[in-house]
Image (spheres, rainbow, N blue to C red):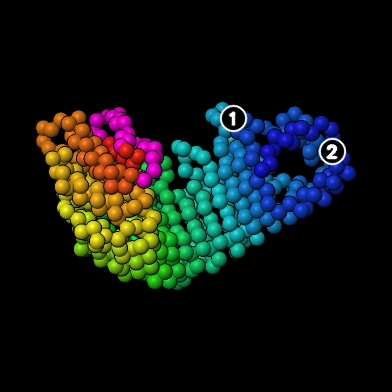
Amino acid sequence: MVSIAALQLITRLLTPADWERFDYYAAKIKVLDLCVPIHCRDPFKNKGHHYLFGRRPTPLLFPQLRILTWSSTSDTHLAPLLVGEQLERLSVTFIPLAPGHHNRSPEDLHAVFGPLPQLKRLHFYINRPHVVPLLAWNDLHSSDKLNVLHVNMRLHPDDMVRLALLPSLQELHFVVESGEDLVPLLAVRDQPIFPSLHTLSLSNSRQHSGASVRSCTALLQKIRPGVLQDVGLEVLGPSSSLVRDQFLSALCNHSSTLHKMRLVDVRIGHTQSLPMDDVFRDHDMISLLPLTNLTHLQLSFVCQYDLGDAMLLQMAASWPALESLRISHRTDVGWRQRSRVTFHGLAGLVKLCPYLCELTLAMDISRIGPEHGELVGNRYVATIDLLDSAIVTQDDEDVLANAARCFATLFPKLEEIFSSNPLWQLRAGEQWRAFLDAVEACWAAIVNRIRVLDPTRRHIASLHDNRGDPRPGAFVQPHMVCGLGLHYN
């Protein structure tokens, strides 16, 4: 790690002999991690700039540099010193100065960096909480070796088309504010887009915007099958059963290669009331069963979920290599109704997917599970998120004991159980505090029994994610029982 603040230690004019000595060692440097402290707003204040460049014939300091990691304010005047055409990897993080200070906009990479014909990987981030810049790089066509592009900005339409036709591009992450941002890609004719792309990630801006499910569907249909392996999409807007079915069918065009799929509706956490008929059902999941290579699946549509044991078992049988299954999302309020997934379905999932290490779904713990001899333990899962699973009362001793037995046997490495308040189970007129106490008591009783069944489980800390409480600003303290962390709200 090199700090540019060290350049301010120069105390005399640098001579040609100084530069010759510097260049001898600088020519050996191929990897540089450079950090410009935020407080160092002008590293060449006063005489520093004159001393550094007064007698140097060329500004480029490291002519053999191949990998540059650069963290700085958005003042980009250092670029000629660091960025040369020989660079292969460039990772830049710009943090704009406080209001009132001069900020040179670095979105125009042509003006900042110029052509980089050897570039293979570019990570470019600007920390701007209220602005989503439009990245433009007119020399992008010169980087015909580019494999990976990660930016937290929108892409200029011309650059987006160049990227879509770039044979070398394998991984792409950028920001989409609306479906209109994808129009240039969809308008490409007579040739396939992203011919070598195996990882595609579209994120939303911080203004809660994003592409629609329909536009993402059109994009997936445009990319030729047999390439995509990892797809991550943050979408915005309503998604009916028909729209979701079209999207999932488009995914199946890539069934021979797709390993990871993540879709999150960015309305999560902001939409509490839903049409009663907007439900993700068993038959909606059928479209994904042909994805036999699937290892990671996250579906977080803003809707109700109605999935049962039979479908969970079909999913497990279709995806034996599954490592992560997340239906809905931790920041959401869950499935919004009683789940039809029981311990029978959960046991089948664990048995058929031996590499499972992440699990998020709602379930009905009131159903008695399989006998102990029928349960196969998982070797990896340490945390499960049960969302708004139904609770039972303290009087349901057999149910609580059964739940503890099943959890302890299925997940011998279990350390944390997340849960949120099942608001759908809150009865009309019931006091919120009493309901919350019942939720606490249910999960505390299960955790207590797990600890009794297996006293060797190690002690861990518990946090709180504050889901489900309808009162403004409500906060519920995390609960900790007998060495197992229990997260709820």
Does residue 30 sit above or below 102 in this rendering? below
Task: Specify start and end residues of the magenta stretch as a single range.
Answer: 456-481
Label 1 crowd (10 A; few <14 / some 14-19 / many >=20) = few
Residue 248 found in image quarter: bottom left
Camera-nearest label, 2 or 1: 2
Q: Secondary structure at mark 1?
A: loop
Q: Position of residue 198 (x, y in %)?
A: 47, 64
Does residue 35 sit above or below 407 in this rendering? above
What is the spatial separation of the Cα atoms under label 2 and label 1, in whole angstroms?
30 Å
The three-letter amino acid code for the residue at tag 2 is Leu
Q: Residue at x 21, y 34 (%)?
A: 436
Residue 48 part of the magenta-drawn span: no
- Tell me the quadrant of the picture where the N terminus can be found: top right
Give the residue pinned by disc 1.
101
- Horizontal relation, residue 157 to residue 253: left or right: right
Disc assigned to residue 333: none
The three-letter amino acid code for the residue at tag 1 is His
Q: Position of residue 288 (x, y in %)?
A: 30, 65
Give the residue pinned by disc 2.
14
- Nearest the viewer among 391 and 265 is 391
Residue 473 part of the magenta-drawn span: yes
Q: Residue at x 30, y 61 (%)?
A: 376
Q: Residue at x 34, y 52 (%)?
A: 412
Going from N to C along the chain, the mark reached first, 2 or 1, is 2
